[in-house]
Amino acid sequence: MSARIVILGAGPTGLGAAHRLGEVGFTDWDIYERDNRVGGLAASLTDDHGFIWDQGGHVMFSHYGYFDDLVEKMLRDDYDEHMREAWIWIRDRFVPYPFQNNIHRLPRDAFLDCVTGIIDAQHKSLPKRNFAEWITAIFGEGIAREFMSPYNFKVWAHPLEMLGTHWQGDRVPTVDVRRILENLVDDRDDVSWGPNNRFKFPLLGTGMLYERIAASLAKPIHMQHEVVGIDARAKRVAFADGSGTSFDHLVTTMPLKELVRCIDGCPSSIREAAGALSHTEGLFVGVGVAEACPSSKCWMYFPESNSPFYRVTYLSNYSPRVTPGPGHFSLLAEVSSSPYKPEDPADVVERTIQGLVASQLLTPEQAASKIVSRQLMRVPYSYPVPTLDRDAALNVIQPWLMERNIYSRGRFGAWRYEIGNTDHSVMMGVEVADYLISGETETTWALLPGEEARARIAG
Ligand SMILES: Cc1cc2nc3c(=O)[nH]c(=O)nc-3n(C[C@H](O)[C@H](O)[C@H](O)COP(=O)(O)OP(=O)(O)OC[C@H]3O[C@@H](n4cnc5c(N)ncnc54)[C@H](O)[C@@H]3O)c2cc1C
């Protein structure tokens, strides 16, 4: 193919695309990245005290042989593999994840509420028009009230009535009453559910994988090149420093909303559709402690209102090399914010530390005298929210872009949470490269609503 491919963003998607172009021997490509480090949301950073932080709790598990092979090739032995130890902190105790399989760990009355709720729900045909209704219809009112509704509001930071239900795939475990009762009778913790019950973690943090992929590319990435304008007709990209570049095909991993804003003369119908897309902001708080780690847990979920975070990870349990040395551990707390659930970044670190004490992850003494690092990471685009009107908006925007040889892929390029993990993102990059070079179908992105978008272009 004699056409120039420009890639915007050196996160997993952009790096996946560049890696694949190199692999098939295509040379007329360049990547431009706004930041001074690669990896995007999957980058890791080292603070002044020697702790390495990911931007939110990342674990690596995959749905693809290609991604697994790439990880092996890039990291060789530089990763650890773990069995998941995930918990829910609720009613002053830890209940193993997934919650609904382990409700026998709740106090008696709460347990009965949850079980009778499930049985009631299974005897009614409740509506499932949105995520809030779906939760009650599947889990019943007890589990909805105890865990699913408050936890999900903390994560999504949007009223759950705004979310659809078609995005869940293997992300949300459902209920099996017989299994719940067996777990009660046998007094058994049931912890094996889900695709991430085993996971990998690079020794120097998630970003290590992306630094290795970047270093393996045949040409350097154009760092600190922020895209500020795109002329879709002249096929040119303008950068903040006044420079620019031409493209035949543009693979972009910028947030779709920002992309649309950058396109000169973009019709109002496309801007309005982009305006319908919702997301959360992430406020991630790293707390480094000068003491040996008291726990073997991986991560924990927090539905209750005595902490601002929805999840906390014992990051130092994934790799001993993410702390300054032995005798230290690190906790990474995640808080979601949006106009529906505003969180003040000015006091979120302090509120997080209070929440860690309230959840018994830190003692008051540790909070007072053993914390040696407090790291606040603000991520303006954290979760692409799968709202009810999302797909209608995407089906307006994506065909219009693709008619102009602009391919918006990745977590916020595609704006589809269900294909928003690192393995999906890398594969979206790989597959769009294959599509451009040899016309192969993009299977990850095309699941929905891509096929429909393509059909409209073809039509
Ligand atoms: C809280 C949280 C937890 C997560 N946990 C997991 C997990 O456990 N496992 C997992 O597999 N995945 C996880 N993910 C998802 C993972 O981070 C994403 O899949 C991945 O980073 C998306 O890659 P991307 O390249 O599509 O986008 P990004 O990582 O967002 O990269 C986009 C790149 O584009 C650049 N860019 C943006 N705008 C411009 C511009 N104007 N000009 C130039 N460059 C620009 C950005 O700087 C960035 O480098 C998590 C994400 C979050 C937020």
Image (cartoon, helix red, strand yellow):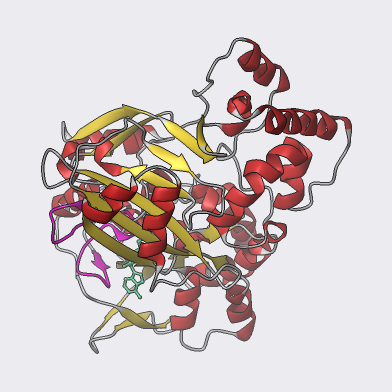
Point 34% across, 58% down: residue: 285
The quarter of the picture where residue 359 lies is: top left
Residue 27's place in the image compared with 80, above or below, is below
> Residue 60 in the image: x percent, y percent?
35, 39
Residue toward you, 389 or 449: 389
Point 40% across, 36% down: residue: 62
Residue 116's place in the image compared with 134, above or below, is above
> Magenta part of the protein: which range?
29-52
- Residue 93 seen in this snapshot: yes
> Residue 305 in the image: x percent, y percent?
56, 54
The quarter of the picture where residue 199 lies is: top left
Residue toward you, 182 or 384: 182
| Left or right of residue 387, residue 32 in this image | left
Q: Residue furthest right?
A: 124
| Quadrant of the image containing the N terminus | bottom left
Q: How many marks?
A: 0
Residue 53's place in the image compared with 33, above or below, is above
- Ligand 1 rendered quadrant: bottom left
